[in-house]
Amino acid sequence: MSYELEGILHKVYEVVTKSATFQTREFIVKTDGQYPQFIKFQCTQDRCGIIDGYEEGSTVKVYFDLRGREWNDKYFTNLNAWRVEKPQESSQDAGNKKSSISDPSFPQEDNVSNNKDSNGPKIEEFDDLPF
């Protein structure tokens, strides 16, 4: 399953060569909102160059997959970016821009109070606490 996130490119790191046949590159995207989040993405192999044409501070849309693995009884999760592009703004969306993960099973802040659980009770109002 793929996800997407829109935000401001905060930091781009150099390509790191892990072995003769494997390389990675990380970058950070800052989301909008009352409590901005700094989300770290990773690119691997031939995808390390997908962030080259973008400057820190520019708005980007990142398409990514979740990757998880186990190593020595420790578990790791990576956000594996596979495409980066400038977001397309329609005239309708220009005044209404928000950063969010687009996944139908992930409730968005705008409509949390309107959603109902499958059993019928109303999902609690969105709480603006950061934890």
Image (tube, rainbow, N blue to C red):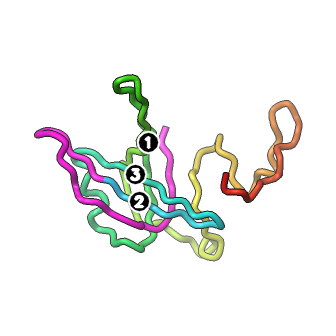
- Looking at the picture, tell me which residue is in the foreground, 13 or 92: 13
- If you read the primary sequence from the N terminus, does the residue marked by circle 1 or circle 3 appear first? 3
- Which stretch did the figure color magenta? 1-25
Mark 2 or 1 closer to N-term?
2
Q: In this picture, is 20 found above or below 95? A: above
Q: Is residue 87 above or below residue 5?
A: below
Q: Is residue 29 rendered magenta in the image?
A: no
Vertical side of 91 occupied by 99: above or below: above
- 1 and 3 marks in contact (CB < 8 Å): no
The one of 96 and 73 positioned closer to us in this rendering: 73
- Of label 3 and label 2, which has the lower sequence position? 2
Mark 1 residue crowding within 10 angstroms, few (<14) / some (14–19) / many (20+): some
Q: CA distance from mark 1 to mark 3?
A: 10 Å
Point out the residue furthest to the left here: 20
Left or right: 92, with 6 as reference point: right
Expressed as whole percent of the image width and height from the top left, the position of residue 30 reads 49, 64
Secondary structure under tag 1 reads strand
Identity of the amino acid at label 2?
Ile
Q: Nearer the viewer, mark 2 or mark 1?
A: 2
What is the C-alpha distance between the residues marked 2 and 1? 15 Å
| In this picture, residue 52 sits left or right of residue 32 | left
Identify the residue position indicated by label 1 in the image: 65
Residue 85, given in percent of the width and then of the height, sits at 39, 62
Q: Position of residue 130 (x, y in %)?
A: 66, 56
What distance separates the C-alpha of mark 3 from that of mark 2? Answer: 6 Å
The answer to which quarter of the image holds residue 94 is bottom right
Residue 64, percent across and down? 43, 47
User: Looking at numbered disc 1 in the image, what kind of residue is underneath it?
Assistant: Asp
Q: Are marks 3 and 2 in contact (CB under 8 Å)?
A: yes
Q: Name the residue tied to disc 3.
A: 41
Residue at numbered disc 2: 28
